[in-house]
Image (cartoon, rainbow, N blue to C red):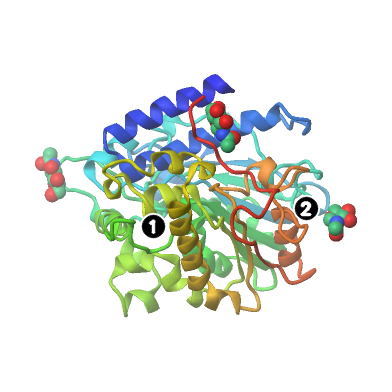
Amino acid sequence: MANHRFQFLKWWRKLTRREWTIAAASLAILVLTLSFISHSNNSAIPANDLMIPFTPLSNAQQKSAFCLDGSLPGYHLQKGFGSGSDKWVLHIEGGGWCNSIETCSFRQTTKLGSSRFMEHEVQFFGILSSDPSQNPDFFDWNKVKIRYCDGGSFSGHPDSEFKNGTEFYFRGQVIWEAVTDELLSIGLSYAKKALLSGCSAGGLATLIHCDDFREILPKDANVKCLVDAGFFLNDKDVAGSPTIERFYQDVVNLQGVAKSLKKDCTSRLEPYKCFFPQEFISSIKTPVFLVQPGYDFWQIQNILVPRSSDPHQSWFRCKLNINNCNSKQLEVLQDFRNSLLKTLDGFHKNPEGGMFINSCFIHCQTWVTETWHSPRSPKINNKTIAEAVGDWYFNREEAKHIDCPFPCNPTCYHMNFTQG
Ligand SMILES: *[C@@H]1O[C@H](CO)[C@@H](O)[C@H](O)[C@H]1NC(C)=O
Ligand SMILES: *[C@@H]1O[C@H](CO)[C@@H](O)[C@H](O)[C@H]1NC(C)=O
Ligand SMILES: *[C@@H]1O[C@H](CO)[C@@H](O)[C@H](O)[C@H]1NC(C)=O
């Protein structure tokens, strides 16, 4: 474990040195979360070591659905059983975005841009676990992990591809349609209940495609969307620069994302602004649940304090471990959380919505058993994330949970990136 984390840190530093900035850190999350999982495997939680194979899309060629490098996209599927046979939970993988030729070509050499580098099989955890003690409400459903290899939250369009020999496939939207078509053909079209979920860039994809997903399922099916760490705030960084806004602008322009965004947003704002959930969440008709940490480390490291905003690296230690932040830095973090809560004011009033805004220094929490549902999971009002999401999905009770500010919640799992 220690060795694994050490390797991750070396890689992370190498990438940041090469100024991959945002894209780099987002790649790092995957590696990090993996080391987190191997950690949780050592604990008392029963290991669910079934390996779920990668299925390349069989209709990919016909639909021209390709990863950034032209390889075939795909998913991992575990069939539902018992009363879960006609219920489906989909989880869209995350992993940042690429915003330039440089970052997209780097991505083509990783599993986030090419299925040639993906695992042939993966284990399912958290919301994808088939163990009822780890996943009380969805364990017996059909479970699908949709792999992310387009670099644009399943929203790129081929008419933005270069015609001059520079080879990138911007097929995010095409991949989304091909994946859902294929799942419909193998049983999703008979779903009685369905939950579309995703984390990080996959959480953003979930929000963008939530209403389309509702549309393609039977009218009488219960369909909802769960967004994990996908509510990226359009805030300025600590130096006052709109770093994330510029970054999103580059992603949207490069990959032709505008066409996948909500029309009632793009008709009043510049398209890249409509890539921010705060600009379109109110126009989503399908019920949405937000799992969002108040101190999302990805947002702190890339939106609030990107490297460019901190030339003297006075935030370096704080960005690695929230317990290292000084009182001035903590104040800035509290403002950032307050900004999130203020932005979510309108959503909070949505009677069909649910939320779990915990005060932890973490990112994705739904596909990791330790944070989703285990004796050591973060809780608010004595509920784990899995319990709160279940309460909302099945209308058992209202599920709008907002934590008290850091450091009040002793159940939090705070990420510690400090090299030991
Ligand atoms: C193709 O066009 C893009 C965008 O204008 C440019 O950045 C890239 O360098 C070009 N590639 C070649 C091989 O000319
Ligand atoms: C918290 O929830 C657990 C499990 O649902 C329950 O057994 C326990 O009594 C609850 N504790 C409080 C203080 O409500
Ligand atoms: C974080 O990890 C480092 C290295 O393993 C360790 O020395 C340090 O005590 C940890 N910090 C906290 C607050 O857990």
Residue that sits furthest to the top in the current view: 3
Mark nearest the camera among 1 and 2 is: 1
Q: Can you give x and y, in whole percent of width and height, for residue 245 in the image?
A: 31, 61
Given residues 242 and 95, the one toward you in this image is 242
- In the structure shown, which secondary structural element does the residue marked by tag 2 occupy? helix
User: Up-down: is 155 above or below 315?
Assistant: below
* Residue labelled with disc 2: 84
Image-based side of 369 in relation to 277, left or right? right
Q: Which residue is rendered at x = 32% and y = 80% of the image?
A: 268
Image-based side of 33 in relation to 150, left or right? right
User: Up-down: is 39 above or below 101?
Assistant: above
Q: Can you give x and y, in whole percent of width and height, for residue 28 in the image?
A: 44, 36
- In the structure shown, which secondary structural element does the residue marked by tag 1 occupy? loop
Residue that sits furthest to the front in the current view: 327
Instruction: First in sequence, mark 1 or 2: give its number.
Output: 2
Q: Residue 155 carries which label?
A: 1
Q: Can you give x and y, in whole percent of width and height, for residue 348 in the image?
A: 59, 75
